[in-house]
Image (spheres, rainbow, N blue to C red):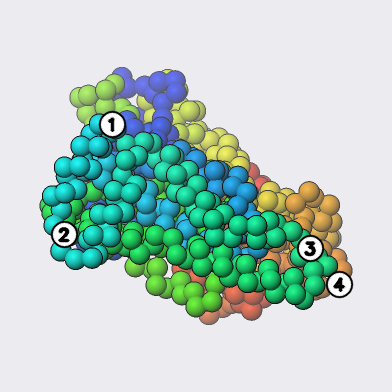
Amino acid sequence: MVDARSSGATFRFKRGASVGEPDAESDQRFLDRCFTDTGYYEALVDCANPQRIIIGRTGAGKSALIQRLKSQAENVIEIAPEELSLNFLSNSDILQTLTRAGVKLDIFYALLWKHVFAVELLKEKFGLLTEEKTRHWLTDVLSCFRKKDQTKERALAYLRDWGDKFWEETEYRIKEVTERLENSVKAQLGADLEFLRSSVEGATREELQTRAEIVHRAQRVINDIQVKALSDVLKLLADDVFEDPQENYFIVIDKLDEGWIDDTLRYRLIRALIETVRAFRAIPAVKIVVALRQDLIQSVFDKTRDAGFQEEKYQSLFLSLRWDSNSLLEMLDKRVRELVREQYTSQSLGLRDVFPPRVGQIDLVDYLLTRTLLRPRDAIAFVNECLRRSEGKGAVTVQAIRDAEVDYATKRINSLTYEWMNHFPLLRKCLVLLERMPTHFKLSSISKDRVDELALDLISAEDATIDPVAVAATKYLNGQSMHAFIIEWTKTLFHVGIAGIKPDGFTAQLWEYADDSAPTDGQIKPSSILFVHPMVWARLGVVTEK
């Protein structure tokens, strides 16, 4: 092993030295040259492998896998949610009226995704980039398809009906399909559509019955849209277009966790997207790859759950990202070597060559990685903070690591607060109970005065009605037990990764990022031991053992 501290090397860290950016899109230099394959990419690029929905927390490497697929595989089509003009759906007066009346639009949303994907695949396959090329394809190429049965005839009729605009941008297709549905609804319901817009308040029994009949007719219109024809199109694509198993095509979708549309509609669209991903498995040479944040997919299932819903039937589609210490060390080592490669070419310097072997009595790698949630983004962020304090030096010192840890812990808390904003908007306030506490303690040791102070602070906050801990605080102050409030607080800290828990003397420590199951309310007892994650010790003033 080469040691930059004793080798006489002239290497020095420059100002702004880093081992990468927090997001994959800005991390091209390191991502391309230092990609660490933990087996997930191989599963993703294999069209025969059912796993195609990448699940993971923020910073776990979902976007990095998407970027890798785009740079390494052929025939990759990227669809950006913000460019689909899906707000056109939110602004549709007819769709809003149907939704408020109770008409289920899931079939329509699934049709939208199927239509968009089918067209994008045909555009890529046949180069339908201009109106002229599309017209030629419609007249010449479509006529060459083998017409074996009525199924193929229906599929070809569908393509002829819609095909003259295939060369347009994707957002055009969203508007085109939506407008056709709106026209169909108006034609079928006529003046009754206006009746649906009226309020049900004070309605008579006869009016409610009339309304129910109109809703039933509207639902039939939705159910009768060209779903069967699109299923026939998928069969045509599988049998006559994408039949070569050696020529694979990929559609990738990322950034679904960002604010591209209203949440209520977004959940429905993502649920329809997942169903569509399943449907496209009928085309073996095509794989639709979607990246979804772990908490987002759970919200989708919770918000769109209906009768007969079975979450386990989707499990085969999921590629759940998990990292271990060895993989993270390999990733960091590659990135450090890449950082110093151009400045120091006579010898190769890795992580252990430019960092001290230990921090106090703890091995360097253990010290660094126990202060992460075992995510690449955390590890990169910590190393970058250390490098920032090593400008002009040939190695990182223990003092630089300890100084870096305070800023790193602060930024990780900020990051978690932003990551979980929609679920736990008052997370930052909840951390006050951890300040100046030991690294681990029994829940019963939290003083009532501190609990009361937090509860009062939470119920006066702006988001008190939607944050689960604040809701529990209101119940506590209205007479519910203090432990019930502590349970909700503990579950929140567990879900975001800031705390782990040992429910009893017979159960091992549980951590969200390492375990598949969360503790139940019954497992969280006053005698349970809460462990504060080392990642936040420096920021919260946690009292560590000497």
Query: Nearer the observer, disc 4 or disc 2?
Result: 2
Q: Position of residue 79 (x, y in %)?
A: 38, 42
- Circles 1 and 2: CB distance less than 8 Å? no
Amino acid tagged 4: Gly
Q: Dot 2, how many residues are within 10 Å of its Cα: few (below 14), some (14-19), or many (20+)? A: some
- Circles 4 and 2: CB distance less than 8 Å? no
Q: CA distance from mark 1 to mark 2?
A: 27 Å
Q: Quadrant of residue 13?
A: top left
Nearer to the camera, 313 or 467: 313
Q: Earlier in the sequence, mark 3 or mark 1?
A: 1
Q: Dot 4, how many residues are within 10 Å of its Cα: few (below 14), some (14-19), or many (20+)? A: few
Q: Position of residue 112 (x, y in %)?
A: 43, 53
Residue 43 appearing in the image:
no
Q: CA distance from mark 3 to mark 4?
A: 10 Å
User: Up-down: is 471 above or below 178?
Assistant: below
Q: Earlier in the sequence, mark 2 or mark 3?
A: 2
Amino acid tagged 1: Thr
Instruction: Return the residue found at the far right.
Output: 478
Q: Earlier in the sequence, mark 1 or mark 4?
A: 1
Q: Quadrant of the N terminus?
A: top left
Residue at 33% of width from left, 61% of height from top? Answer: 229
Q: Earlier in the sequence, mark 3 or mark 4?
A: 3
Residue 143 appearing in the image:
yes
Relative horizontal placement of residue 60, taking residue 424 as reference (left or right) = left
Nearer to the camera, 494 or 46: 46
Mark on residue 69?
none
Q: Which residue is mark 3?
A: 473
Q: Which residue is mark 2?
A: 147
Q: CA distance from mark 1 to mark 4?
A: 69 Å
Residue at 73% of width from left, 72% of height from top? Answer: 208
Query: SS for tag 2?
Result: loop
